[in-house]
Image: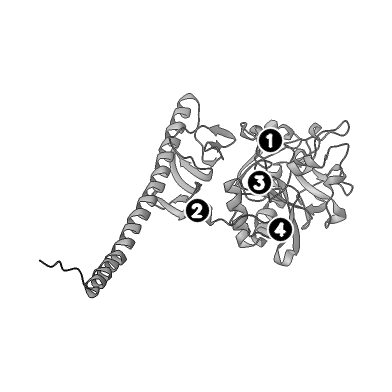
Amino acid sequence: MKNKGFTLIELLAVIVILAIIALIAVPIILNIINNAKESSSLRKGELYLDAVEQAAARKNLDEDFNPNTCEVQSDGNLMCDGEELVVEVDGEKPTDGTITFERGIVKKVEDLTYKDVVLETDEKGNFRIKDKSKEEEVKDPVSFETDDWGTIVGNIRKGNTDKYTVGATRQVDLGRLGVHTLRIANTTRPTECDREGFSQTACGFVIEFADIINSQQMNPTNTNVGGWNSSSLRTYLTSTIYDALPQELKDVIIDTYVVSGHGKNDNNDQNYVLQNEKLYLLSPHEVYEDGSFNKVSTYDTSYNNTRQLDYYHSIGVTTDDYSGAMKSGGEDDYWWLRSAYSSYTYDFYGVFDDGGWHNDSVGNTKGVAPAFRIG
């Protein structure tokens, strides 16, 4: 008997049929895989929030712990009103984000950042994927001067910051406020940053204005009562100057827990705290370490609640050797710091035109050179 094989036409027909099946099946399979990945991402967020609420409830049993807003730290634990909340959960933890509570229950989650996805909650409290910006999609860093803000932050989140060195600068256009210079002021986060009540203003990736934007009064009412929190300059900073920033920069600025010193007539002699600041002035200790003379710690009550920024530490700025603190572009090149001078009722700290610190009346007009964190 003679065996009969497939003809060429029959083979081609089989290939065409298989190709059609592949065209139909492959998208379905890929969609199933993507849905599974998304479900996995949402599930890890849900597990993390369950662990957060459990940790908050346990802490509240031992002490009065009812935070309003907590910031997710790089180790997955939370910083709530200057107090750390340790979160224990199996699997991957987020490295950034903001969690808002209401009576001990999570009310809202923003920018919960994992290695391959960013999550948030909708108006019903359900998780959704905000950004699928995977690590491999982040461009390799070139320089702080040339990279776009998305690339810079993507590499910060990956820990790939070798190209972004302390002291590096770039230009930013503030519209009618002019073109100014930004400088990397800090890249590290030492363990002291996790201390309860510690200001986060010199922790993580901090950028400062290397020159002075313009000159303003600290307070036209001629008082330092209420500290930085109650100053008219803070209002100007958080409105006029923040509004002038490019949108792509605003998108990467993160909220910061800010501690600043009080003046002579403040009630209870307590330092001032702000929870979710975008822009802030530097404090005396963030610029100077105490030297032998004219110590800033003497009249800055928040000195021990913050640390010197990496930039000023690297160039050795102290109260004895201070030329590295000079900036240009403002009223006699003098620029304001955010701590009230504790010995007087109407003075704040500032940096003089030679770089040394100085106290001056809040009604005087001096330079504005804020800082902020990105991540």
| Dot 1 amino acid type | Asn
Image height of 31 relative to 267, above or below: below
Question: Which comes before the other along the chain, label 3 or label 2?
Answer: 2
Three-letter residue code for mark 2: Lys
- Give whichever of 229, 214 is nearer the camera: 214
Q: Which residue is mark 1?
A: 271
Residue 269 lies in quadrant = top right
x 31%, y 60%: residue: 28
Answer with mark 1 or mark 2, whichever residue precedes in sequence.
2
**Numbered tag placed on residue 145 in the rendering:** 4
Dot 1 alpha-carbon crowd within 10 angstroms: few under 14, some 14 to 19, many 20 or more: many
Disc number lying in front (3 or 4): 4
Mark 2 or mark 4, which has the lower sequence index? 2
- Cα–Cα gap, marks 1 and 2: 41 Å
Residue closest to the eye, 335 or 312: 312
Residue 200 drawn above or below residue 59: below
Is disc 4 placed on a helix, strand or loop?
A: loop
Give the CA distance from mark 4 to mark 1: 36 Å
Can you tell which mark lies on residue 205? 3
Closer to us: mark 1 or mark 2? 2
Q: Residue at x 30, y 64 (%)?
A: 22
- Foreground tag (4 vs 1): 4
